[in-house]
Amino acid sequence: MDTEVGVVFRRQSTIMPETMGRMTRDFLRANDAVEPQEAFHARAARARDAVFGRQVFVRGVVEVSNYCRQNCHYCAMRRDNRQLMRYRLAADEVADLIIHHRPASITDIDIQAGEDPAAVREVVLPLMRELRRHTDLGITLCLGTLSSREYDELRADA
């Protein structure tokens, strides 16, 4: 059975790009650096094109767990946040969705979690094995601080 997965891209803020654009223009005017700055940007664009061409890479972010053993005060996933409904996804279900139902435009997957060693063992390692076996996706991990052994396990199948 084919299942269509819809992806909605929303502009997160119209204020920030407008403000940043204004700030950049003001900075350039204030420092009388329009020509050197434009030359710098042109050189950066040429370097980017030489390395990547005109390709666009679209990264899908998959948060597999919001459990965390840390208690960072700025983070909603912090250990002592009792109001947060905790979850840890099942590796086989996530693998099936990514392998068979992701939008064709996705070229890379970013697997994220709170600092959750159980998620690394039970979700991330099996998920990475399946993704490497069945896709050519680039894989990025954001899992907090791990032990040397955990890093070795993540690298083992690379």
Image: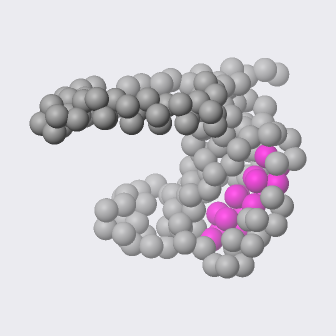
Residue situated furthest left in the rendering: 30
Can you say which quadrant of the picture contains the C terminus?
bottom right
Q: Position of residue 57 (x, y in %)?
A: 61, 32
| Residue at image location 59% in from the left, 37% down from the top | 59
Residue nearest the observer in this picture, 80 or 137: 137
Q: In terms of image quadrants, where is residue 15?
A: top left
Residue range in magenta is: 117-131
Q: In terms of image quadrants, where is residue 65?
A: bottom right
Can you say which quadrant of the picture contains the N terminus?
top right
Task: Determine whether, in the image, residue 34 is placed left or right of residue 157.
Answer: left
The colour scheme used to paint the residues is: one colour
Whether residue 32 is visible to the viewer of this picture, yes or no, is yes
Majority SS type along the magenta span: helix
Question: In this rendering, is residue 120 above or below 62?
Answer: below
How many circles with numbers are drawn on the protein? 0
Q: Position of residue 29 (x, y in %)?
A: 15, 31
Q: Position of residue 18 (x, y in %)?
A: 24, 26
Question: In this rendering, is residue 76 above or below 24?
Answer: below
